[in-house]
Amino acid sequence: MTVTPPPEALRAPLVVEFPFTRSLGPVQSAFLTGLRERTVLGVRTGSGEVLVPPVEYDPATAAELRDLVEVAATGTVTTWAWNHEPRPGQPLTTPFAWVLVRLDGADTALLHALDAPGPDTVHTGLRVRIRWAADRIGAITDIACFEPHDSGPAPGPQAHDGLFDAPVTGIVAAARLDYTYSPGRAQTRYLHALAERRTVGERCPRCTKVYVPPRGACPTCGVATTDQVEVGPRGTVTTYCIVNIKARNAGNDAVEVPYVYAHIALDGAGLALHGRIGGIPYDQVRMGLRVEPVWSEGGRYPDHYRPTGEPDADYDTYKELL
């Protein structure tokens, strides 16, 4: 008997990124615009504490805060951690310290990077000052980093009206996660099958549900799902939504809004997967619509699903998959 060894598990770098646009209220607008002008602003609470960075509501009382004050560009390290291997996108490219700095005039600490020659030169109580970026745009990166500075405490906070020319009213915040993803043996088999224009799931030996994509184990029964089952390629739309806002960097500029994204129960599968519906006006997509895959160039995955022309599936055949 010949035994076929399982395929080697795949590994690939993966980036999850979601840049989103945020509008700023009067406090955050003044703070970021102030950084552009080399001015650090905090906000005074009803109890007299000065919070830097400023917030719009008192964390203790929830009272609205609008009393802006200017604090110094010098301060004291309250705690720190050494970063031996800076990652892409971090403030400095050489080893540095992450520090919490209580700026003179503030009662809370600001997190940023400290440019120091080594961990033996950093300690709690170290006096530092801001190193301003050469090009400032109204963002926290206008503070390039902190640097050690031999100075005494500066005078207390000074009242500030928060008014600047051309205030910053919104920012684009980029949330990004870089990591290496390994799908495991079950999904590795699934991906290899997709490259052959086949969709393969795995059946639970106890409840007989066919999972697509496969998970390697049944989450309900807790047993391994080693029995491979080819499903589809046709399926039924169970539920769907109409997308009216085009995602930035979606990777397919040819897809115009509005379009339909649906849950599709492939024939033989025990749960629905999701996919885009094409080849039909968005307002004609419906529950029970029978669809088939249209494969991407090279055939590695379905680009979208289109109607097969078959009569709609009866509701009772897919109601358990909603």
Image: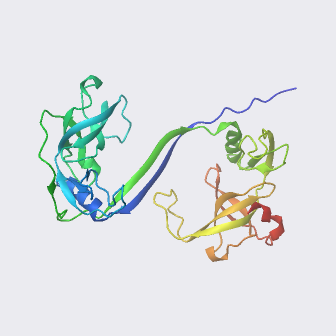
Q: Which residue is drawn at 32% across and 33% down?
A: 80
Image position, residue 68 (x, y; %)? 21, 59
Quarter in which the C terminus is drawn: bottom right
Quarter in which the N terminus is drawn: top right
Image position, residue 225 (x, y; %)? 78, 41
Q: Which residue is drawn at 77% across and 55% down?
A: 232
Image position, residue 92 (x, y; %)? 29, 37
Q: Residue at x 24, y 49 (%)?
A: 142
Looking at the image, residue 12 sits to the left or right of residue 198; the answer is: left
Image position, residue 24 (x, y; %)? 32, 63
Looking at the image, which is closer to me, 79 or 140? 79
Q: Which residue is drawn at 49% across and 65% down?
A: 246
Q: Can residue 93 be seen in this view?
A: no
Is 1 above or below relative to 51?
above
Looking at the image, residue 300 sits to the left or right of residue 218; the answer is: left
Q: Is residue 88 visible?
A: yes
Looking at the image, which is closer to me, 222 or 212? 222
Looking at the image, residue 106 sits to the left or right of residue 319; the answer is: left
- Display coloring: rainbow
Query: Which quarter of the figure has residue 239?
Result: bottom right
Question: Looking at the image, which residue sits at the far bottom?
Answer: 283
Looking at the image, which is closer to me, 166 or 111? 111
Question: Looking at the image, which residue sits at the far right?
Answer: 1
